[in-house]
């Protein structure tokens, strides 16, 4: 009897062992990630053994990991009904909730399993991963550490921990808590020395926080590993660009681009080609960039990254309409595209389509919450339409003993994207100690600005000037009406009419000379750094005199940041009548000068930064048939941006060019300017 029992037990164990051996092939498929083969294998097993728990478990895992999470959840739900107390079945059911992204339910479920078995490594790790998916990173790190206490050094748990740190840091970065994000990434590096993903995230954080030296240092660490050399070069090229070192950026990107033959990584090839095309664009090598992009278009005509490159090239060339066309196609391909949405916003803004630009930027934030570039774009666009006050006080004097003190006040109040209310009040007091002439004037004006078309804006003001001079008190009408037109890309034209008074000194104010100015300003920029500006005035005066004034400037942009340009100016003036005893009115006046201009614009300056401008010029002037005279001109400005809403600057001018004053004297001016945005954003936007 005992022998029969032993024989029966042996047969049973042999059968179980043989059955397990039969399923080993399927287990191997699961372990090696061959889920389709595992699915087929265990499906066949279940045809013969439909109630086998192990086969059902493995089949459920195979289909869940092979892209059929809902079917897997159904299978494990049924399996759980059959084996309600089986902990392994419970674990697999919980995992099926994760496959279906049902994280809220999974959180409660796995917490229950941990209460049931506090030392279960799978339950602890799955719960930690669930919390991570819910972006509850602090709690996720607590439970992944508990899992590692159970199985120290487990590679799956370590990998989860790494990505929890990355996710937590990104969450802090999105909240613009850059110091906290940096601390988390550095903690990750203590656990995973020189980890590529962590270093890339840290470098990107430094770029966003504008810590360019730290970003460069991080990419240098990444470059120490030969496998990461190309990736590091791409990052270093971007750092150089952000530092304004475009030639260095191109050199680095060229080095990376030339190394592509050493890699088979398709993603890395795309990133490197993209950076190289960008570096060519930054360096205004538009022809070379266009050739590279055209080759990419031939093989990838609808790839978003290629379309974005072509759109970027056209933005730099001011072909904004072409850029919008490409960005629109990107959004057809992927409505969530960052490049498509924010790129479109920039192009639409340049075209004067401000409402559409706002919409595109806000769409970006729908998909990329609190994204810094998009929020900055909206903030800068808001500044354009935020009501502001600008005040200026100045003191002028010349070697003709004329002195003047002036206060100018201007208010601009946008009521919509297209419509602005304008107002100004100006006061001027002038005197001459030699002639004992004194005069004061008060100017009041109001008006509006209206965008008729995206490329056409009307501006009109009207008001009164009240003057009190030595022998004459009077009131006169003032007006300024103009149209600003952008006829073609890189071109700007303003035409207008302005009625004003000769008010440079007390004697001129006393004479009540009204000027009717018909004027035109035209500027042309190019894609090869050359620019041209021309201004023409025809002035009809109430004293029966008339003036023609032509000013033209040809210049070359030497540096972009800070802006440095140099060029040649020419000025021509002629008056119908010559009345030199009253004001400078030669029959012919010619002046030629060379100049250089260095500027850091106040719109580029960040809060708590200085901005400045310096212009120096020298040349020759010819007054009628007189001998030529040398001329000079110095203008300077130094300002400080206290906040996004408040700035102030000192300014000064000295010039001996005869046309600089109505009397033809050497002219000096010093003053203070103040600008304040009245609100944090436009009044017409929520």
Image: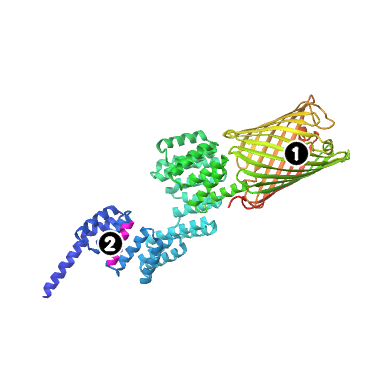
Is 586 situated left or right of 448 in this image?
right
Q: Is residue 88 above or below residue 391?
A: below
Q: What kind of secondary structure does the magenta stretch mostly adopt? A: helix
Q: Is residue 151 magenta?
A: no
Quarter of the image with the N terminus in it: bottom left
Q: Is residue 80 magenta?
A: yes
What kind of element bears circle 2? helix
How far apart are labels 2 and 1 at the CA level?
89 Å
Nearest the viewer among 277 and 72 is: 72
Quarter-of-image position of residue 544: top right
Mark 1 neighbour class, 10 Å CA radius: few under 14, some 14 to 19, many 20 or more:
many
Q: Is residue 272 visible?
A: no
Count of numbered circles on the image: 2
Nearest the viewer among 174 and 328 is: 328
Identify the mark at residue 456; answer none if there is no mark.
Answer: none
Residue 612, position as x, y percentages in the image: 67, 45
Q: Earlier in the sequence, mark 2 or mark 1?
A: 2
Residue linked to disc 2: 57
Mark 2 neighbour class, 10 Å CA radius: few under 14, some 14 to 19, many 20 or more:
some
Residue 490, position as x, y percentages in the image: 59, 35
Residue 376, position as x, y percentages in the image: 57, 49
Is 116 situated left or right of 600 in this image?
left
Quarter-of-image position of residue 652: top right
Identify the mark at residue 478; answer none if there is no mark.
Answer: 1
Q: Residue furthest bottom?
A: 1
Quarter-of-image position of residue 442: top right
Is 30 situated left or right of 532 in this image?
left
Q: Is residue 306 above or below residue 97?
A: above
The magenta stretch spans which residues? 69-81
What kind of element bears circle 1? strand
Q: Is residue 334 visible?
A: yes
């Amino acid at each position: 009897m005992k022998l029969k029992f032993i024989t029966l037990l042996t047969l049973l164990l042999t059968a179980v062992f043989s059955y397990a051996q039969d399923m080993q092939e399927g287990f191997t498929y699961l372990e090696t990630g061959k889920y389709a083969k595992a699915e087929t294998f265990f499906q066949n097993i279940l045809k013969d053994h439909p109630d086998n728990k192990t086969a059902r478990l493995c089949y459920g895992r195979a289909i869940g990991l092979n892209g059929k999470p809902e079917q897997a959840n159904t299978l494990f739900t049924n399996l759980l009904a059959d084996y309600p107390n089986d902990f392994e079945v419970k674990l697999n059911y919980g995992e099926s909730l994760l496959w279906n992204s049902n994280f809220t339910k999974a959180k409660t479920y796995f917490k229950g399993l941990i209460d049931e078995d506090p030392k279960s490594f799978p339950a602890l790790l799955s719960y930690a991963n669930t919390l991570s998916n819910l972006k509850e990173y602090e709690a996720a790190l607590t439970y992944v550490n508990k899992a590692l206490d159970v199985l120290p050094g487990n590679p799956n748990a370590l990998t989860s921990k790494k990505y929890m740190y990355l996710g937590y840091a990104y969450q802090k970065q999105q909240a613009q808590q850059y110091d906290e994000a940096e601390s988390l990434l550095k903690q990750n590096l203590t656990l995973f020395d020189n980890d590529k993903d962590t270093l890339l995230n840290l470098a990107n954080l430094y770029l966003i926080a504008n810590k360019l030296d730290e970003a460069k240092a991080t990419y240098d660490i990444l470059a120490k590993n030969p496998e990461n050399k190309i990736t590091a070069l791409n990052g270093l090229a971007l750092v150089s660009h952000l530092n304004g070192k475009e030639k260095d950026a191109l050199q680095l990107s060229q080095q990376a681009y030339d190394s592509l033959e050493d890699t088979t990584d398709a993603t890395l090839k795309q990133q490197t080609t993209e950076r190289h095309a960008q570096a060519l664009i930054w360096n205004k090598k538009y022809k070379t960039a266009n050739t590279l992009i055209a080759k990419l278009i031939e093989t990838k005509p609808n790839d978003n990254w290629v379309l974005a490159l072509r759109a970027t090239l056209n933005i730099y060339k001011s072909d904004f309409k072409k850029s919008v066309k490409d960005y629109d196609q990107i959004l057809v391909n992927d409505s969530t595209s960052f490049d498509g949405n924010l790129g479109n916003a920039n192009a639409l803004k340049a075209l004067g389509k401000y409402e559409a630009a706002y919409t595109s930027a806000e769409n970006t934030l729908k998909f990329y919450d609190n994204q810094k570039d998009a929020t900055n774009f909206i903030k800068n666009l808001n500044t354009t339409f935020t009501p502001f006050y600008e005040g200026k006080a100045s003191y002028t004097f010349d070697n003709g003993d004329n002195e003047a003190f002036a206060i100018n006040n201007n208010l601009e109040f946008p009521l919509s994207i297209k419509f602005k209310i304008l107002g100004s009040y100006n006061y001027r007091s002038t005197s001459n100690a030699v002639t004992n002439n004194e005069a004061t004037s008060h100017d009041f004006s109001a008006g509006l600005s209206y965008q008729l078309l995206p490329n056409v804006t009307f501006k009109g003001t009207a008001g009164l000037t009240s003057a009190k001079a030595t022998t004459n008190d009077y009131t006169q009408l003032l007006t300024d009406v103009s149209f600003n037109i952008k006829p073609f890309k890189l071109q700007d034209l303003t035409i207008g009419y302005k009625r004003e008074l000769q008010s440079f000194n007390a004697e001129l104010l006393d004479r009540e000379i009204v000027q009717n100015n018909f004027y035109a300003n035209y500027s042309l920029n190019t894609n090869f750094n050359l620019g041209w500006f021309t201004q023409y005035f025809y002035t009809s005066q109430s004293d029966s005199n008339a003036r023609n004034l032509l000013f033209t400037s040809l210049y070359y942009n030497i540096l972009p940041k800070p802006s440095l340009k140099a060029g040649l100016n020419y000025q021509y003036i002629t008056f119908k009548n010559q009345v030199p005893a009253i004001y400078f009115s030669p029959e012919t006046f010619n002046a030629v000068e060379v100049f250089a201009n260095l500027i850091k614009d106040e719109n580029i300056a960040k809060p708590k930064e200085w901005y400045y401008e310096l212009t120096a010029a020298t040349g020759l002037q010819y007054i009628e048939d007189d001998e030529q005279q040398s001329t000079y001109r110095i203008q300077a400005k130094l300002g400080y941006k206290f906040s996004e809403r408040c700035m102030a600057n000192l300014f000064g001018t000295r010039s001996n060019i005869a046309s600089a004053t109505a009397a033809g004297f050497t002219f000096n001016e010093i003053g203070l300017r103040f600008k304040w945005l009245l609100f944090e954003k436009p009044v017409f936007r929520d």
